[in-house]
Amino acid sequence: MEKRTNFSSKLGIVLASAGSAVGLGNVWRFPTEVGEGGGAAFILVYILCVVLLGLPLMVAEFIIGRHTHKNTADAYRQLAPRSGWIAQGYIGVFTSWFILCYYSVVAGWTLKYLVEALSGGLGSISDSAAYFKAFSGATWEPLAYMAIVMLMCHLVIIRGVQAGIERSSKLMMPLLLMIIAVLLVFSFSMPGSREGLTFLLKPDLSKLTSSVILSAMGQAFFSLSIAMGCLCTYASYFTDDARLVKTAGSVALIDTVVAVMAGFIMFPAVFSVEAVTPDAGPGLVFITLPHVFRIAFGSVPLVGWFFAVMFYLLLLLAALTSMVSIHEPPTAFLIEHFRLSRPVATTIVTAVCLAVGTLCCLSFGALADCRPLFGLTFFDFFDFVSAKIFLPLGGMIISLFVGWRLDRKIIVGQLTNAGTIRIPAWAVSAFVFLLRWFIPLAMGGIFVKELGII
Ligand code: PHE
């Protein structure tokens, strides 16, 4: 079994954790939700959710991970031996494993679109909706792209914490942030930038229904990678001098800024071409935007080409850094729990994901009618179980665990780095209050909503 290592620097810690948080959720889901949920009013609610719910939960996961320096399953076993809380450790391991199975399908699509953008092929697609349907519904091509991105992720994870996760994050995250800056300049110089920004930012309080508020919470959790075992596993590699609250603050800030910027990039571009209300989710990124790029190609080919290449590269980088963070929890679990070597553990996780990912990938074509579980396709089933059930459930359990069960001395010791940083006592009490009462109630709300009970 390999010797446990830590991240080598504070920068590595922030970039790896931010890499986990910044993902497809920021670039495609957030902007659409803002557009549909009342513009600036939604952004405000979202920020409140990040600060009041997301941040405390992220810190709670960091505390568990860094205190134990163990994979998620063994971390709970150490903190609460022979108790039901151990289940949460396993939920973390398996939820991330589930997410990877369907996340890699979409990551594969982004690679395909990047290849098409690079070759200029995107410029000649006349009906982008039909094109996307044909591609995602095919058998071999989407499978091949999914396998390639899985392999990329595999090659990072197999190298371990410092040479794999940390090095790749230090390379990919700055590149990602640079691309965002370049795309912002492009997008703001487009003729429709005013309409796009108005659509995105017009505060429309009438749209702020309870269901929109709950969506903002769900989006905040998914986007911050909370309750999936990823943050807890990464924190188990944090050094003792890393400041947990500061790190969580930086990660949440980067994640939120990237999400808002993604909206600033996409909507001006979309509205420059036609005043359409963009489709949600995959539609926006794989149907509406290719249409925008094609028109841009038609007028100034080089500009269209550049914008498209940069955009899909951004999406691929965002997806890859998140995939890496989702691969690590099950890998660390197999290494430490079953005493496997890293190459063997990594290969097992990748192989299972490829097998289950194949079912998810074919859900858009050959297996579209195969719905053995709750009448859902495999893709929708894995999405539903992980993001809609285990995410809110896990969030609730983590906050109850750290709020009620974990020894206050451990919490204070982690927050103050064994007494070397000063944190006022009221701040610790406020943190524990949020975990004990506020967050479990809010998470309960999400849970009930996601299951369609209200
Ligand atoms: N936060 C990532 C995103 O925004 C997704 C993710 C979820 C990553 C859970 C890790 C764990 O896309």
Image: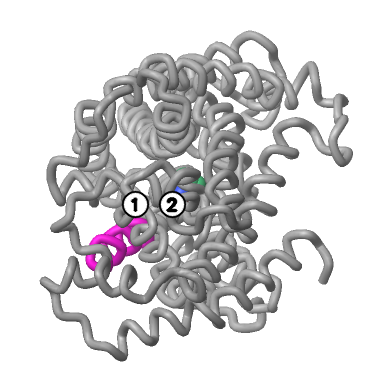
Identify the residue at horizontal 24%, vertical 29% (top origin).
3
Q: Is residue 418 left or right of residue 111?
A: left
Residue at x-position 39% and y-position 58% = 64
Q: Position of residue 303 (x, y in %)?
A: 32, 33
Marks 1/2: CA distance?
7 Å
Observer-nearest residue: 356 or 422?
422
Image spot of residue 112 (x, y percent): 49, 20
Image quadrant occupied by the C terminus: bottom right
Mark 2 crowd level (few <14, some 14–19, many ≥20, 10 Å Cα): few
* Numbered circle sitting on residue 68: 1
Residue nearest the observer in this picture, 438 or 267: 438
Q: Where residue 78 is drawn, which disc sits there?
A: 2
Q: Nearer the viewer, residue 33 or 197?
A: 33
Instruction: Decide whether residue 107 is among the magenta residues.
Output: no
Disc 2 beta carbon < 8 A from ligand 1?
no
Q: Is residue 109 visible?
A: yes
At 56% across and 34% down in the image, what residue appears?
97
User: Which stretch appears magenta?
Assistant: 245-257
